[in-house]
Image (cartoon, rainbow, N blue to C red):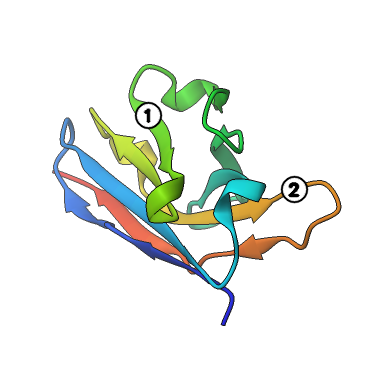
Amino acid sequence: QVQLVVSGGGSVHPGGSLRLSCAAYGFTIERYSMTWYRQAPGKDRELVATISRAGENTDYADPVKGRFIISRDNAKHTMYLQMNNLQPEDTALYFCKAHGAGRPTYWGQGTQVTVSS
């Protein structure tokens, strides 16, 4: 069964850290670029960070640059998002996506990240 399983969300205080994981099952992850998105209540889904198939290229949304790190381990079929210095505005449901030219797009289920004092 093809799926992306997201884990690692939770509640932290401002300045805290969390690491999200997105594990792929049923397909070959190294053939896909991978992206993290988030959606806060009442807002549109926004791209957070993206990583190329082999991990050599990454890109980040401006609000998370310098705080979040996207990475992947294709041998473990998993992508990660290390989130440091979290702020209340980072509170959102976080999703992962696998995508590639000519390939189907897969979405993981969301994981909630809540940052509050």
Q: Residue at x 44, y 20 (%)?
A: 65
For numbered disc 1, what is the local secondary structure? strand
For the residue pair 26 and 8, the one nearer the viewer reads as 26
Q: Label 2 sits on what residue type?
A: Gly
The residue furthest bottom is: 1
Q: Which of marks 1 and 2 is nearer the N terminus?
A: 1
Q: Residue at x 61, y 38 (%)?
A: 53
Residue 88: image location, x then y, percent: 30, 39
Within the image, what quadrant is residue 35 found in?
top right
Q: Which residue is drawn at 23% across and 28% down?
A: 85
The residue furthest right is: 102
Q: Which mark is residue 69?
A: 1
Residue bearing the label numbered 2: 100
For the residue pair 14 and 76, the one nearer the viewer reads as 76
> Looking at the picture, does residue 71 appear above or below residue 109?
above
- For this view, does 70 lie left or right of residue 10? right
Q: In which quarter of the image is the C terminus?
A: top left
**Mark 2 surroundings within 10 Å by alpha-carbon count, few (fewer than 14), some (14 through 19), many (20 or more):** some
Q: Residue at x 30, y 36 (%)?
A: 83
Instruction: Note whether residue 77 is visible.
Output: yes
For numbered disc 2, what is the local secondary structure? loop
- For this view, does 106 lie left or right of residue 25? right
Spatial CA distance of label 1 from label 2 is 21 Å
- For this view, does 90 lie left or right of residue 108? left
Q: In which quarter of the image is the N terminus?
A: bottom right
Residue 56: image location, x then y, percent: 54, 23
For the residue pair 29 and 6, the one nearer the viewer reads as 29
**Mark 1 surroundings within 10 Å by alpha-carbon count, few (fewer than 14), some (14 through 19), many (20 or more):** some
> Looking at the picture, does residue 98 appear above or below residue 46?
below
Instruction: Note whether residue 32 is visible.
Output: no
